Image (tube, coloured by chain):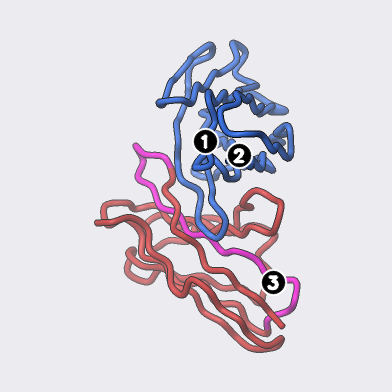
Chain colours: A red, B blue
Amino acid sequence: DTGVSQDPRHKITKRGQNVTFRCDPISEHNRLYWYRQTLGQGPEFLTYFQNEAQLEKSRLLSDRFSAERPKGSFSTLEIQRTEQGDSAMYLCASSSQRTEAFFGQGTRLTVV
Amino acid sequence: TQLLEQSPQFLSIQEGENLTVYCNSSSVFSSLQWYRQEPGEGPVLLVTVVTGGEVKKLKRLTFQFGDARKDSSLHITAAQPGDTGLYLCADSSGTYKYIFGTGTRLKVLA
């Protein structure tokens, strides 16, 4: 296993379109996180899964955002009706109870 | 809500110089992680420190955790262009959720 994998790496979309990102965590990790990072800032927590259960959602995650982890393995993050303010780097991370979080390379979203 | 402040925000130095960056928390750390992030990439874990007063070394990087577990420093000796990046401190806040500082953006000029 080579680490956390995210797809796509880059996404340019028009305002109002829907986008979906995928994250494949490290295989033995049962915890999965989504973070958002804007220029000049540290990552901000969006949501957390333990296995397939979504245990917490940040207030940053508006109704237009939805995340799933259907079989406790990969996860998807969907943004509906994108807005320019959604432009950011979306980071996925995974961990087990005994390890720190390891991050993927991120998906850079640009809404035009 | 815990706040992590990092200083300086930006640092530009010549290759071979030494530098120190700082991370201060508004509350006691549960466990402190330092990450480095290169442009367009995700953060990469450098080290975890847990015990107050702990010092860890990773080649030319020295990480120090304050006795009161509310502050930390990262010292780089003889910086190289490959050290360029955004240095982030983070706390797991005793839960699964990580809180990050705003980062120190380091540029090492050849």
User: Disc 3: which chain?
Assistant: A
Image quadrant in which you'd find residue B45: top left
Q: The C terminus of chain B appears in which quarter of the rendering?
A: top right
What residue does disc 2 label? B108
Callout 3: helix, strand or loop?
helix
Q: Are marks 1 and 2 on the same chain?
A: yes
- The CA span between labels 3 and 2 is 31 Å
Numbered disc in front, either 3 or 2: 2
Callout 2: helix, strand or loop?
strand
Which residue, as the protein is rendered here, is positioned at the far front?
Answer: B110
- The CA span between labels 1 and 3 is 35 Å
When the figure is inspected, residue B61 is found, relative to residue A30, above or below; the finding is above
The x, y position of residue A74, in whole percent, is 36, 67
Residue found at x 60% / y 23%: B18
Q: The N terminus of chain B appears in which quarter of the rendering?
A: top right
Left or right? Give the position of B7 relative to A51: right
Q: For mark 3, does the 10 Å Cα neighbourhood hold few (<14), some (14 to 19), or many (20 or more) residues?
A: some
Residue found at x 53% / y 41%: B81
Identity, as a three-letter code, of the amino acid under mark 3: Asp
Q: Which disc is residue B80 wearing?
A: 1
User: Disc 1: which chain?
Assistant: B
Cβ–Cβ below 8 Å for labels 1 and 3?
no
The front one of B9 and A92 is B9
The question of residue B100 being in magenta is answered with: no
What residue does disc 3 label? A86
Cβ–Cβ below 8 Å for labels 1 and 2?
yes
- The CA span between labels 1 and 2 is 6 Å
The boundaries of the magenta stretch are A82-100
